[in-house]
Image: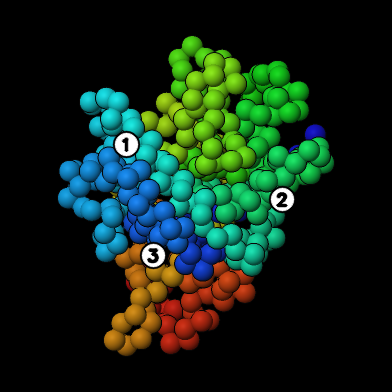
Amino acid sequence: MNKMNNTDKTVYILGAGSSISHTNNKSPTIEDIFIFGKKIARSFDIYKQYSDRYKDLGKYIFDFFGLDMFTVYNKINVEDILTSITISIEKYPNPLVYKIRNDLLDLINFVLTNINESLTGDYYTFKNQLKKNDSIISFNWDLLLDNILGRLLIWIDNTDDKTNSLYHNMFFNRFAAEPEYYLGNMGNSPPEREINKGQSVYLKLHGSIDWQYCNKEMCRGKNKLFPVFLPKAKHYCSYCYALTQRLVIPPLLNKQFDKYPAIGALWNIAAKELQFAKRVVIWGYSLPKTDFYSDWIIRQARIGDIKELVIINPSVIRESRTGENINYPFVRKFYSIFRKIIEKEDCKLYTSHKDFIKKQDVFAKFPLLDKNNYLNLL
Ligand SMILES: [Zn+2]
């Protein structure tokens, strides 16, 4: 097999901000999923059904957070709620709290499958500039990028379309259970002695709304990741016929990742990919302070030969009385991960993906910014 060289591997790390930018603010942050849910329900004229459907979830959020999910003004962090419910299940498992968890996953699904697909958004230019051994690490649950990489072709009855897309090559063929079925690839591979540095992978480290798994202990389908065509529909395990579960997991419980099928492997591969990265591009990801595992995973790039860090985020700039200024606390959070490994001038800042494509960094965009000051203060 032709060994590609890895000298120019870029690893892209995507957070909610990339989908928000792709859709021109029509996709939610982790804090306004409930606001979107309410708006979508109203636009479909099903608000009454919506509030009945999520009554138990609303009560849980009110009881444990003192917040009313049916009031639009409240910003409620959906990851915090999902984390709390997951701990409740661990401590006091009972049918109601399982139902509440499923209700929340349903609601997330309801919102994320009703985002209007953009026909011109950033993900198209993002896809077109990918090089052959670049990799993508995403913390997003939505399907916007998956669809642009060719997700829907998987379910088309044409082998060429199925196997030609980036979605197939970077994710489906490597991590999904279906290739065993579709492609007759039934054998297990022996342990590898060397990691393929030239690989190009798409890793969704917090799961995805279209991923299902069977959680029945004795089932042959256990520990397999099943992407599905219709994320809104119920699915049943094809081995044991139990109802399958959604593979959407909260970031704060990363220590549980090994409990879920495939997720532990995705994290291991993400760490390796970062170790081979020459350049890391962090787009729309804000690295929450409590997300220790994500911090750890990005730090793996220190082991390798990283030369450049790129941050794409409107938050790299803040407005001050004297005009635009670098948002030092925000930028430092990322740069400090690579301190003494990459030069300050190789930490590049862009306020948008369009600027990144145009190579118009913040110093080109805002000529009044003082670059020397940046290099001194960072
Ligand atoms: Zn099963």
Distance from Cα at disc 1 to Cα at disc 3:
37 Å
Q: Secondary structure at mark 3?
A: helix
The image position of residue 230, as x and y in percent, is: 59, 41
Q: List the residue tagged with mark 2.
A: 132
Instruction: Identify the mark nearer the N-term, 2 or 3.
Output: 2
Residue lying at 33% horizontally and 41% vertically, measured from the top left: 82
Instruction: Identify the mark nearer the N-term, 1 or 3.
Output: 1
Q: List the residue tagged with mark 3.
A: 331
Q: Secondary structure at mark 1?
A: helix
Image vertical order of residue 4 relative to residue 116, above or below: above
Q: Secondary structure at mark 2?
A: loop
In the foreground, 247 or 57: 57
Is the CB of mark 2 within 8 Å of ligand 1?
no
Comparing labels 2 and 1, the label whose residue is closer to the camera: 1
Q: List the residue tagged with mark 1.
A: 100
The image position of residue 1, as x and y in percent, is: 80, 34
The image position of residue 301, as x and y in percent, is: 50, 47
